[in-house]
Amino acid sequence: MNVSVFISLVSLCFLFSNAAQALTVSTFRGEVPFPQTPQTVVAFPAGVIDTLDALGVSVQGVPENLFLDYVDTQKAQTVGTLFTADIEKIHKMSPDLVIIGERSALQYDVLTDVAPVIDLSIPRGNTFQESLKRMHSLAKLFDKEDKAKEIENRLYELRDQAKKWINPDDSVMVVMLMGRALNVLSSQTRIDWFQEELGMNLEASDVKSLNEVAPISYEYILSKNPDWLIVMDRDASVGRSAKDLSKEYMDTPLIHATKAWQKNQIIYLNGVGTLNSVGGVQGIEHTLEELIKTFSARMNGQP
């Protein structure tokens, strides 16, 4: 056989072998092939950074003002904000992968000029299940599938524990404080999984919202008169306020008149995992642990 022909055949075999070994990762925009595991990674969504940290994957570039107090990002470079990428910094880093999501999704086209990009935005409907799917996509890409299975088992275990304390016949309203404004989170928002996975009977499906901002009043809360109130301070969760004002804002005559207040069925939830790290598996774990602790305490008559 001619030597040049032999070399060509060997080269083709090598290419086909590499193609066969290439990973295919599910993303918001479809399947994306990867010839090898990325080594230098930039990630924008807090939930993705949370999940990568849980899997044991280091991220070299993150947005500023991340406010995940349980994730150490001190060794990572800041490469813009949650909404806007610093293209020059990212270009200098020459990352193998840039991960964008809900808030940074508009940066997709401009970032593809400087690095491979995948969009791991989470569709609404059941954020719990979509978060597990995203985790498994990341685990596949970074060869962390055993760890992902371990995390999944833990989350299902906590979900089942939390579900035992929730009466599906009781109405639940989830209130998010934003500055001085009250907003309600319905089953159409990032807490959709409270209803889909935990069986909560969420109120406020009649509220018109702009994205996830749905302003309400104390009068509205009283008119719905929920059995349970779950309250989170968004400003505290994203570092805009040094103090969580949830309890202070609920201590009013109109709230005192609700069934939730009179039955001692108001839960003050840390918003970092639920509001900030949307789709992050550690955030979901922390939220479930809080729900188990607080629901069980209220059901047992504890403050």
Image (cartoon, rainbow, N blue to C red):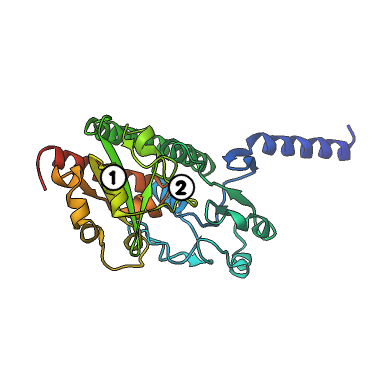
Please identify the quarter of the rendering in which residue 12 is found.
Answer: top right
**Mark sitting earlier along the chain (1/2):** 2
Callout 1 secondary element? helix
Q: Which residue is at 58% across, 39% downward?
A: 25
Which label is found at residue 223?
Answer: 1
Q: Nearer the viewer, residue 285 or 260?
A: 260
Q: Which residue is at 25% across, 58% downward?
A: 246
Residue lying furthest right in this view?
2
Q: Quadrant of the N terminus?
A: top right
Mark 2 neighbour class, 10 Å CA radius: few under 14, some 14 to 19, many 20 or more: few
Mark 1 neighbour class, 10 Å CA radius: few under 14, some 14 to 19, many 20 or more: few
Q: Is residue 59 above or below residue 18?
A: below
Tell me the residue that label 2 is attached to. Answer: 208
Q: Is residue 156 visible?
A: yes
Q: Amino acid at mark 1?
A: Ser
Q: How much space separates mark 1 and mark 2, taking CA atoms?
A: 16 Å
Residue 71: image location, x then y, percent: 37, 57
Q: Which residue is at 60% across, 65% downward?
A: 90
Q: Amino acid at mark 2?
A: Lys
Residue 11: image location, x then y, percent: 78, 40
Residue 53 appears left or right of 252: right
Q: Is residue 151 visible?
A: no
Residue 278: image location, x then y, percent: 42, 49
Which label is found at residue 187?
Answer: none
